[in-house]
Image (cartoon, rainbow, N blue to C red):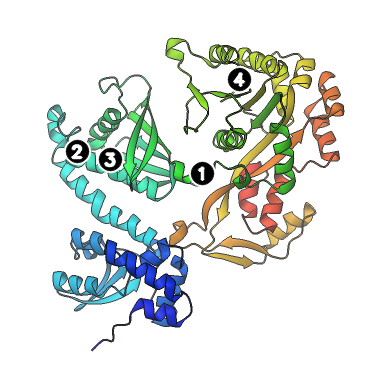
Amino acid sequence: MTTRIRLGDLLLSMGMITQEQLDHALEIQRETKGRLGEILIQEGYLSEEQFIEVLEFQLGVPHVNLFRFQIDPTIVALIPESVARRYQVLALKKERNKLTVAMVDPLDYYAIDDIRMSTGFNVEPVIASKHEMQVYIERYYGLPGSLEELSTLVPKEEALGEHVTDEDSPVVRLVNQIVHQGLQQRASDIHIDPGLEEVIVRYRVDGLLRTELTLPKSMQNIVITRIKIMANLNIAERRLPQDGRMQVEVDFRQVDIRVSTIPTVHGEKCVMRLLDAKNAVLELDKLGMSPENLRVFQSMIRSAHGMVLITGPTGSGKTTTLYAALGHLSSVERNIITIEDPVEYQLPGINQVQVNPVIGLTFARGLRSILRQDPDIVMVGEIRDSETAEIAVRGSLTGHLVLSTLHTNDAVSSLTRLIDMGIEPFLVASAVTGIVAQRLVRRVCDQCRAVYTPTPSEAAWLEAHGVPMTQMVKGSGCGHCNNTGYRGRLAIHEVVKLDDELRGMVVEKRTDAEYRSYVQSQGMTSLLEDGMAKIAAGLTTLSEVLRVSGWD
């Protein structure tokens, strides 16, 4: 007979939790009927990694990485979907009368008994992380079921109206599951790409796209139509680009989604931008700036007037930095107004205006009106043209602090860009207080990080650039990071605050190379140097820094 070890007693005997913590968790368990291990993790008494280690090393329960496991859908189907979802389990392997089952909580003996009765197999439990389990349950139960049902409806496309609006229909469930899985994987964007013979669903996670699902070509129109209905777009218009917005509820929280469609030679392509406030970094001290860069940036945005620019390519986190700055500056004594395209996150206490070119509300026109609203601080989402640049510059010279973004490769080239837009050099020199250039690099996964000796090519590059390192960090790949070795992103920065010497150089229209040489002589940390510091701190890798900084 198997001895049933109680998890609470085991953790208590190992000194990993206190009696008070256990009593509190047991009280919650009595009220919610949840799993004790999950409750201890949710309450912060235990990390998921500690929980897995206890089960693996103290009880001998093997730990599997589902992302590395060859999973057979026919084996998965041995466990009914209702049982898999209720207990968070997944069948992995069958040998005679034994079924290997991945479980979030392998000490859940009720689950083991239920699986044995529903399948007729003896159960050998192994442990997997909750994140992996959620992803794979959706992958093997949610999407295939909806696809199978949906395939029976496609030939009747002329009668699909009820199917794209009925909340219980397979197409609605399919779209919901695509969105839900994207949020589970922390995707920033979901791409639905039409091809000649199939439709590819891709998720952008930590800045890189990866294929998640392939749909039959016959399902293209019904899926796009459902998304259009959710975003309040014209379902009959398939020849022109459209933009919309929708809101979905996931895990008892509201998530905003921006939707963009565009016609291609193979049909409409759709991109959904997931604006999940839960994953947004809206605090200044969490942007990843070095202490010196943060100090300089804070001094720039504390100015009573002037222009502060954030620069970098699309997707480099410029808007996030602006939002963090506005959150830091927000108070009842200040009138802060923004004009954006689009408004990504709604900030309390700040007046946000959405650009609408269809009715003539452009950046330039909106900015003119904002300057008549007695603002203390103005945020312009992006300076795209000379008219907006001129109004922003003049606004910063008449007692307002103006924050905005530009698309340039580094900080000092923003000065030349403004001059190229037709702004007089003396106005640029007077208006601009400071500039921040930034890029986003992937962060090494905390769960599978490992120290290693640089390869000969890495060592040669480091030596050639005067930053020799004997040890660096990389991720080996695990379930926590989808087997990529990275989880999350952080920014690398270069911060330039204009002084009298640099202003004089701007008036003289010096070259970008001269600007850069001067600011580096004054101690500015370049993007590459900031990236190297983050490598030395074990936060990212050399390949990531070189990838985003444009070095070969």
Q: Would you call the spot at circle 3 few (<14 residues within 10 Å), some (14-19), or many (20 or more)? A: some
Give the structural element (helix, strand or loop) at label 2: loop
**Cα gap from disc 1 to disc 2, whole angstroms:** 32 Å
Q: Where residue 303 sits in the image (x, y, percent)?
A: 72, 29
**Cα gap from disc 4 to disc 1, whole angstroms:** 35 Å
Left or right of 261? Residue 277 is right
Instruction: Tell me, yes or no, if residue 194 can be seen here.
Output: no
Q: Would you call the spot at circle 2 few (<14 residues within 10 Å), some (14-19), or many (20 or more)? A: few
Circle 4/circle 3 CB separation < 8 Å: no
Give the quadrant of residue 127.
bottom left
Please name which of the two marks, 3 or 2, marks the residue nearer to the observer. 2
Residue 48 position (above or below residue 184): below
Residue 325 position (above or below residue 45): above
Q: Residue 175 shows which numbered tag?
A: 3
Give the structural element (helix, strand or loop) at label 3: helix
Q: Residue 167 shows which numbered tag?
A: 2
Q: Residue 375 shows which numbered tag?
A: 4
Residue 279 position (above or below residue 49): above
